[in-house]
Image (cartoon, grey):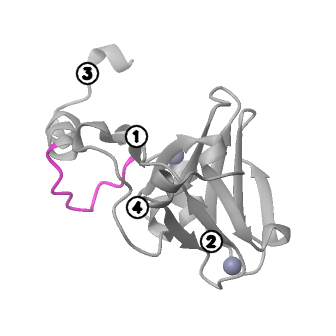
Amino acid sequence: MTITSHLMDCTLNGRCACGSIRYSIAMPAREILHCHCTICRRIHGAVFASFASVPRDAVDITAGREFLTEFASSRDVRRYFCRTCGSHLLIEDDRTPQFTWYSVGTLDGGHPGHSESVERHVFLESRVSWFRFSDPQVCASQVLADQPPSRAKG
Ligand SMILES: [Zn+2]
Ligand SMILES: [Zn+2]
């Protein structure tokens, strides 16, 4: 793909833990999700996983494409990880074919370029109960979760 010079200015670089796979991102993130779902927790081995979405053609695998391995974590979602070190780098969701999600924790550094208003926690109902989150969004939902189960949940 051709990257125009003004986009080169905000190019971000990332890689897997062993360095076999390297990628660059040519656009600011349009959204950041911190996902607390059980699939992300297990796959990333972390209490939540953080992803940035960008147009699919803004992602360029610059090295090690042959190491990129696919795992279909559900019918619509494919996750791409390094077959050597296991770092999860990319997610594609057939329901949003114009976008790719990348794991922001694998960036070499720098700001993903999103505005604070598009950063949010999702699947909070699946989050671990013992971790003390300081993000106001999580704290607000913690208060709700600590209340007796609602009858609506059945
Ligand atoms: Zn690797
Ligand atoms: Zn998830």
Residue at 21% x, 37% y is 141
| Residue 82 inside the magenta-drawn segment | no
Residue under label 4, please give it. Answer: 47
Q: Earlier in the sequence, mark 3 or mark 1?
A: 1
Q: Residue furthest bottom?
A: 18
Front label number (4 vs 2): 2
Residue under label 2, please give it. Answer: 87
Residue under label 3, please give it. Answer: 150
Where disc 3 sits, the SS reads loop
Part of the protein shown in magenta: 127-136
Separation of residues labelled 1 and 4 (CA atoms): 20 Å
Separation of residues labelled 1 and 2 (CA atoms): 21 Å
Q: Position of residue 30 (x, y in %)?
A: 42, 39
| Amino acid type, callout 3 | Ser
* Left or right: 113, with 106 as reference point: left
| Amino acid type, callout 1 | Glu
Residue contact between numbered discs 1 and 2, judged by CB atoms under 8 Å: no
| Amino acid type, callout 2 | Ser
Q: Position of residue 29 (x, y in %)?
A: 43, 46
Q: Earlier in the sequence, mark 4 or mark 3?
A: 4
Residue under label 1, please give it. Answer: 31
Q: Is mark 2 within 8 Å of ligand 1?
A: yes
Above or below: residue 120 compared with residue 133: above
Q: Position of residue 91 (x, y in %)?
A: 63, 48
